Image: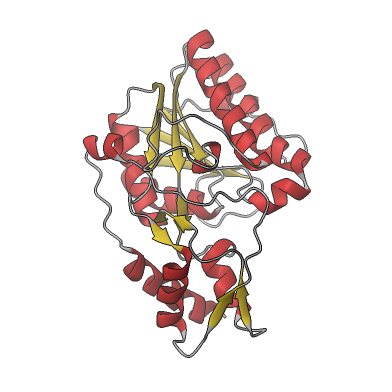
């Protein structure tokens, strides 16, 4: 099997490349000029064109890990987020349809497409009501995958990833918790009662490998998460208990635009394919804290 990882230098993309390159012939694709020892193709960040890539190479599976993944920045720069999360997917699908129509296309989407849920846990049939430009653009990308499956016969699948974290991630909650210790006192957004379904990047990649093997790629949609609801207060307590248990923190009550209140995934569909998460939050944060200390 020949696999292409688009966005192979990003957070989840690097995890995907590391895993799949051990098991299959795997090529990486990204915008950076250097990529170490990877089988690598650079895409022009100003005028991304995937036609040459899919003309020259024929892949069995393309995993798209590219795009922006920052809700706050999508609010500030919605045009940039649209370009990275929608236009890029359109360009990739169009090139595959023209040059490599048998290639299976797996697009990384986000739980942000659900918005504030009507019920918990959230299954794949839950109505989509994104509340941020990021979530809206991820939904548009999903619609493109569905369109190309129905109208061009492409084999597409979407994975909706919940709150992924892990070594190498320099943004979002746990990175912010580490950075805030440099300028005490530590004051966090919200009330602490907000919740997320945290899933370690290694488990995300394990789930993607199962989806690649088991999905029919018939416009399929699969939640990727651990299936466990954890409050932000509990997550912060676990982090600081590992990082420095002398650090105190408070919640300022301020809400951020685009952030939902509570999330937890129904992962029955993923489990039916054979997935079982192996890294609980405390174990995953122990790994993350060790990485954080080494890199600070």
178 relative to 258, above or below: below
Q: Is residue 56 left or right of residue 120?
A: right
Residue farthest toward the bottom in the current orientation of the protein: 246
Residue in front for this viewpoint, 243 or 5: 243
Counting from the top left corner in percent of width and height, residue 238 is at: 40, 74
Residue occupying the far top of the picture: 151
Q: Position of residue 145 (x, y in %)?
A: 53, 23
The answer to whether 260 is drawn above or below residue 119 in the figure is below
Nearer the observer, 129 or 160: 129
Q: Tell me if I can see residue 111 in this picture.
A: yes
On-image quarter of the C terminus: bottom right
User: For residue 83, which quarter of the picture?
Assistant: top right
Q: Where residue 268 sits in the image (x, y, percent)?
A: 27, 38
Above or below — where is 199 with respect to 81?
below
Tell me what residue is drawn at x 30 percent, y 61 percent: 279
The reply, left or right, for residue 26 in relation to residue 184 is: left
Q: Residue at x 33, y 41 (%)?
A: 266
Q: Choose top left, top right, bottom left or bottom right for residue 45.
A: top right
């Amino acid at each position: 099997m020949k696999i292409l990882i688009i966005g192979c230098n990003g957070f989840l993309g690097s995890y995907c490349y590391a895993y799949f390159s051990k098991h299959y012939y795997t090529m990486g694709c990204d915008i950076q000029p250097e990529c170490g020892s990877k089988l690598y193709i650079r895409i022009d960040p100003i005028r991304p064109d995937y036609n040459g890539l899919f003309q020259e190479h024929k892949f069995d599976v393309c995993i798209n890990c590219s795009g922006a993944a920052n809700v706050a920045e999508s609010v500030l720069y919605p045009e940039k987020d649209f370009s990275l999360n929608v236009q890029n997917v359109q360009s990739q699908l169009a090139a595959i349809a023209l040059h490599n129509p048998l290639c299976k296309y797996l697009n990384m989407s986000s739980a942000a497409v659900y918005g504030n849920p009507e019920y918990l846990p959230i299954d794949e049939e839950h109505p989509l009501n994104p509340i941020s430009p990021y979530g809206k653009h991820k939904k548009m990308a999903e619609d493109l995958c569905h369109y190309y499956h129905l109208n061009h016969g492409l084999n597409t699948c979407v994975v909706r990833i919940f709150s992924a974290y892990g070594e190498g991630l320099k943004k979002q909650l746990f990175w912010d918790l580490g950075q805030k210790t440099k300028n005490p006192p530590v004051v966090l957004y919200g009330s602490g009662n907000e919740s997320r379904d945290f899933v370690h990047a290694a488990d995300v990649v394990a789930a993607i490998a199962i989806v690649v093997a088991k999905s029919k790629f018939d416009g399929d949609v699969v939640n990727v998460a651990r299936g466990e609801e954890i409050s932000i207060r509990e997550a912060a307590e676990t982090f600081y208990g590992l990082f420095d248990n002398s650090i105190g923190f408070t919640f300022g009550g301020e809400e951020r635009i685009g952030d939902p209140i509570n999330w937890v995934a129904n992962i029955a569909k993923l489990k039916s394919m054979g997935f079982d998460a192996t890294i609980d939050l405390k174990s995953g944060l122990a790994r993350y804290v060790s990485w954080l200390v080494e890199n600070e």
